[in-house]
Image (cartoon, helix red, strand yellow):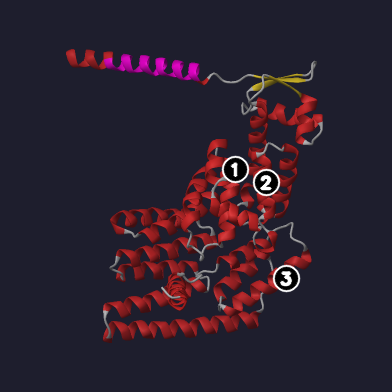
């Protein structure tokens, strides 16, 4: 094949991919801006910049209902003139679409009617009128016949749920999407659903479920309406370090070419540099570095991400516990001062942390304060399993004997 023909083929493939990209309706970046504006730790100057950017996007998308909602949410005085302009633009456009629907129902076919209803649903979704958008999407769903088109409508509802973090709406539509997939969803839509479900699971603190779905989505990611590929890599590493054991972490993350390619590049504005150091510090058992980079991630990224912010304290505690377990597991006894040195913290800090974790049953060890050592008490899983089987077996035998007596009576 000639070089010119190859270039033509590549261009055609690129155009085909571009056609498959779903519109960002609603735009989840707007929801992130709203979250940052209500965050107590945002710098006032930064908050002003975010507000200006949000207002610009609200004007661009004619988001009358959403503008009112945001002003009420963050306690800002609403610009009545702007709100009136947006409201009039919304009413005008909705009337135009309603006229299109009426015309399509009277003069055109089912496909044109469906398209008109879809335009109305997407417009209501775009301007941030959640209740009206949900009702309109359900109307459109009833007018839709093909499984693929129906799944796309469900994806719209899931995105709307993610925009407002309406867990009931997200949950119900993920379940519906799975049901439709079993009836005949194609590979591309099944792959897209992994990203949607993974993002939702992460937002409700199911990091193990999120990690499994993100790792499946990484090689064939296409849900750019949800997040960038760089964001996917960030979420994948954050959830996988928490969820996976060392052998799986090595196989699925450390040796994953797609993940390592992004981490090595550092991402746009070097936003993946800290998460790369975090992964390497944890896997390389460099605990002093791990604590520093974990604190940096918590301070700069986790608490300012709308999906992870409610869980950043939990995540930080869980990762410190995982680091302590990883450090202590190979030993029978460890000196407190040596452990404190390895973690780059004071002996008092380690003592306090371990006391809390031992008291709650999360760490199986005890501290000998006189000798200044930690004595490990590794749980004997084989004996525990054996005792559990014997106990369950006795219960089963008793039930069988009772049933036999009833039958023979």
Residue 167 placement, left or right of 141: right
Residue 221 on image: x %, y %: 48, 59
Q: CA distance from mark 1 to mark 2?
A: 9 Å
Magenta span: helix, strand or loop, mainly? helix
Is residue 231 positioned above or below 88 on the image?
A: above
12 to the left or right of 326: left
Q: Position of residue 272 (x, y in %)?
A: 66, 55
Q: Position of residue 230 (x, y in %)?
A: 59, 59
- For the question of whether residue 118 can be seen, the reply is yes
- Is 298 placed left or right of 110 in the picture? right
Q: Write down the quadrant of residue 68 in the picture.
A: bottom right
SS type, badge 1: helix
Q: Nearer the viewer, residue 264 or 350?
A: 264
Magenta stretch: give its range: 382-400
Res 159 label:
none
Q: Quadrant of residue 401?
A: top left
Q: Residues within 10 Å of mark 2 (few under 14, many from 20)?
A: many
Residue 5, position as x, y percentages in the image: 43, 77
Which one is in front in this view, the residue at disc 1 or the one at disc 3? 1
- Residue at 65% across / 47% down in the picture? 312
Q: Are marks 1 and 2 in contact (CB under 8 Å)?
A: yes
- Identified at 59% across, 58% down, the residue is 231
Which numbered marker is on residue 49?
Answer: 3
The residue carrying mark 1 is: 241
Residue with the mark numbered 2: 278
């Amino acid at each position: 094949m000639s070089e010119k023909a190859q270039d033509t083929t590549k261009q055609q493939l690129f155009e085909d991919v571009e056609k498959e990209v779903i519109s960002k309706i609603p735009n989840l970046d707007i929801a992130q801006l709203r979250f940052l504006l209500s965050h107590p730790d945002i710098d006032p100057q930064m908050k002003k910049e975010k507000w200006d950017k949000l207002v610009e996007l609200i004007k661009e998308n004619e988001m009358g209902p959403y503008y009112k909602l945001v002003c009420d949410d963050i306690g800002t005085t609403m610009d009545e003139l702007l709100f009136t302009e947006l409201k009039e633009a919304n009413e005008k456009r909705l009337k135009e679409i309603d006229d299109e629907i009426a015309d399509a129902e009277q003069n055109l076919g089912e496909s044109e009617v469906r398209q008109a209803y879809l335009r109305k649903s997407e417009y209501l979704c775009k301007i941030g009128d959640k209740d009206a958008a949900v009702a309109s999407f359900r109307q459109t769903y009833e007018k839709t016949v093909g499984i693929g088109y129906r799944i796309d409508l469900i994806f719209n509802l899931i995105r709307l749920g993610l925009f407002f973090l309406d867990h009931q709406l997200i949950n119900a539509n993920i379940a519906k999407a799975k049901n439709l997939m079993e009836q005949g969803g194609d590979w591309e839509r099944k792959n897209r659903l992994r990203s949607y479900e993974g993002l939702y699971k992460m937002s409700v603190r199911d990091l193990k479920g999120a990690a499994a779905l993100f790792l499946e989505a990484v090689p064939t990611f296409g849900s750019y309406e949800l997040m960038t590929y760089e964001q996917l890599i960030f979420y994948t590493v954050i959830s996988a370090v928490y969820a996976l054991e060392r052998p799986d972490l090595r196989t699925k993350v450390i040796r994953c070419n797609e993940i390592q390619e992004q981490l090595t590049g550092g991402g746009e504005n070097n936003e993946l540099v800290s998460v790369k150091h975090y992964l390497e510090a944890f896997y390389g058992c460099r605990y002093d570095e791990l604590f520093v980079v974990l604190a940096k991630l918590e301070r700069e990224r986790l608490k300012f991400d709308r999906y992870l912010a409610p869980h950043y304290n939990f995540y930080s505690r869980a990762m410190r516990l995982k680091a302590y377990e990883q450090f202590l597991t190979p030993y029978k006894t460890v000196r407190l001062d040596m452990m404190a040195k390895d973690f780059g913290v004071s002996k008092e800090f380690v003592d306090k942390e371990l006391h809390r974790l031992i008291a709650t049953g999360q760490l199986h060890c005890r501290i000998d304060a006189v000798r200044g050592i930690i004595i490990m008490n590794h749980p004997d899983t084989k004996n525990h399993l054996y005792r559990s089987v014997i106990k369950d077996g006795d219960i089963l035998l008793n039930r069988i004997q009772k049933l036999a007596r009833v039958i023979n009576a």
